[in-house]
Image: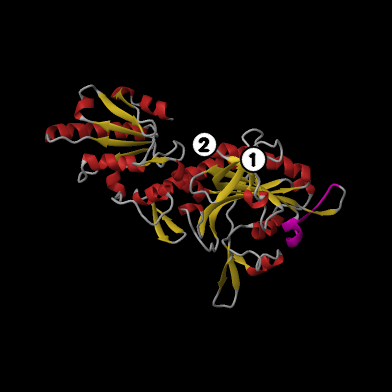
């Protein structure tokens, strides 16, 4: 992608009204626009990051049998009344139509996916079933904060599993844990699996937590035996209940959670099946969420320096930032541009994702500042000096390592950074 085509403009000042440095950089670099408290617009670079994360999540969900669907965001009141959550779910956005009908803006989809599963499930032969979606959710948060970590509108992957027995539910629950670990590793995140309250969903759950300075959760963790629990259910404790070792208290941000719903929603919404013995039974369910937009915020919060973002390779909007260095000599500039254009085209033809800063009206110094702010995994500079050696300069954003690479061996640059 050429920057002259995407009308790319960064902001000179870091936003002062954001508590998260990562979100401030995303706004300054034009990944995001803050529409109002707890609501953000995704601009071209930010949208590419979202799609990269969605791709990682989608591949892992399909690998464990998930079938993708897309459910409605506008939910009839009767579905939420059937489960008793119309009045008990505090963050529920309620919409009153001009035809005197009430709806909920979906904060989660148990009330919708459970009756929907009746299209698939009739007997034990139809189980198990795994359905997932990636969709915008809405929650009427009283105090949106920490950028994308707590918002009124957010993007979420929710997977729902349907089972005949508790043993089958338990086995799939562990399979999802493994898939989640792979997802977060690909996103460059180190997660802890913490026991937590299940809220309105189930008696308990497991949360995937990432240690961050701006984290809204306090987690008790034992580095000796691995015990990990959210303070919300643990209360105030100093020693590990399993091995009596001192506990460390960590500020963390939740990026995913999983619940065993069992028959809570199937019994309320009449989702049953005929078992091998000919008897009608409630379907058992599990629910597994990942905050896609929360992931963007968490990655941004943990991957930056004083100059801007440092994107993990698989979540970066582009693999590389390409810049041509201008001189005072018009003929030399034309030659540098020709060589830079040729290198760009070779990369594009080979399928690499390159952001090419070809803007004529922007100084090279400004381009360097923008490149650090955007924070792609590597930066390539073509200049009079490098061309004299039939080379280009490659700089790794994270390590700062710089080396000259022969232009004819340009693919090696990507082999080293992928």
Where disc 2 sits, the SS reads: helix
Callout 2: few (<14), some (14-19), or many (20+) C-alpha neighbours within 10 Å?
Answer: some
Indicate the position of residue 348 as horizontal and vertical percent values: 35, 35
Dot 1 and dot 2 residues touching (CB under 8 Å)? no
Query: Which residue is nearer to you in this view: 323 or 304?
Result: 304
- Outermost residue, right side: 277
Answer with the quarter of the image where residue 115 lies. Answer: bottom right
Which numbered circle lies on residue 177? 1
Residue at 70% across / 66% down in the picture? 84
Residue at 47% across / 48% down in the picture? 297
Indicate the position of residue 101 as horizontal and vertical percent values: 60, 74
Indicate the position of residue 418 as horizontal and vertical percent values: 44, 30
Query: Which residue is nearer to you in this view: 51 or 90?
Result: 90
| Residue range highlighted in magenta | 264-276
- Classify residue 157 as left or right of residue 306: right
Q: Which residue is mark 2?
A: 186
Residue at 47% across / 59% down in the picture? 38
Answer with the quarter of the image where residue 345 lies. Answer: top left
Residue at 59% across / 69% down in the picture? 103
Q: Can residue 367 be spotted in the picture?
A: yes
Q: Can residue 44 be spotted in the picture?
A: no
Residue 267 lies in magenta, yes or no?
Answer: yes
Where disc 1 sits, the SS reads: helix
Residue 245 lies in magenta, yes or no?
Answer: no
């Amino acid at each position: 992608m050429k920057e002259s085509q995407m009308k790319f403009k960064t902001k000179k000042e870091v936003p002062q009204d954001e508590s998260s440095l990562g979100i401030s950089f995303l706004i300054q670099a034009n990944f995001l626009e803050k529409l109002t408290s707890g609501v953000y617009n995704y601009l071209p670079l930010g949208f590419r990051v979202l799609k990269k994360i969605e791709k990682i999540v989608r591949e892992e969900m399909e690998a464990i049998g998930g079938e993708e669907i897309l459910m409605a965001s506008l939910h009839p009141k009767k579905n939420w009344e059937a489960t008793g959550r119309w009045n008990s779910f505090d963050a529920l956005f309620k919409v009153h139509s001009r035809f005197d009908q009430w709806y909920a803006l979906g904060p989660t989809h148990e009330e919708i996916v459970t009756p929907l599963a009746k299209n698939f499930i009739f007997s034990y032969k139809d189980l198990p079933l795994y359905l997932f979606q990636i969709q915008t959710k809405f929650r009427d948060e009283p105090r949106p904060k920490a950028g994308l970590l707590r918002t009124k509108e957010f993007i979420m992957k929710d997977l729902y599993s349907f089972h005949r027995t508790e043993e089958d539910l338990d086995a799939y629950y562990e399979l999802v844990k493994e898939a989640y670990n792979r997802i977060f590793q690909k996103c460059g995140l180190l997660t802890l699996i913490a026991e937590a309250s299940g809220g309105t969903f189930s008696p308990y759950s497991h949360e995937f937590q990432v240690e961050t300075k701006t984290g809204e959760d306090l987690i008790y963790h034992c580095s000796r035996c691995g015990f990990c629990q959210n303070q919300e259910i643990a209360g105030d404790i100093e020693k590990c209940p399993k091995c009596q070792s001192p506990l460390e208290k960590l500020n963390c941000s939740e990026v995913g959670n999983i619940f065993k719903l069992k028959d809570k929603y199937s019994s309320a919404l009449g989702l049953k099946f005929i078992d091998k013995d000919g008897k009608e039974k409630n379907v058992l369910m599990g629910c597994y969420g990942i905050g896609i937009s929360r992931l963007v915020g968490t990655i941004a919060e943990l991957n930056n320096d004083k100059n801007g973002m440092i994107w993990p390779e698989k979540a970066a909007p582009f693999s590389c930032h390409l810049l041509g260095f201008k001189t005072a000599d018009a003929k030399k500039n034309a030659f540098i541009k020709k060589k830079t254009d040729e290198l760009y085209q070779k990369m594009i033809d080979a399928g690499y994702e390159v952001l090419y800063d070809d803007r004529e009206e922007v100084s090279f110094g400004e381009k360097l500042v923008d490149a650090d702010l955007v924070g792609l995994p590597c930066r390539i500079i073509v200049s009079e000096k490098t061309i004299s050696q039939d080379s280009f300069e490659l700089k790794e954003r994270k390590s700062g390592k710089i080396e000259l690479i022969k232009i004819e061996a340009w693919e090696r640059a990507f082999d080293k950074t992928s």
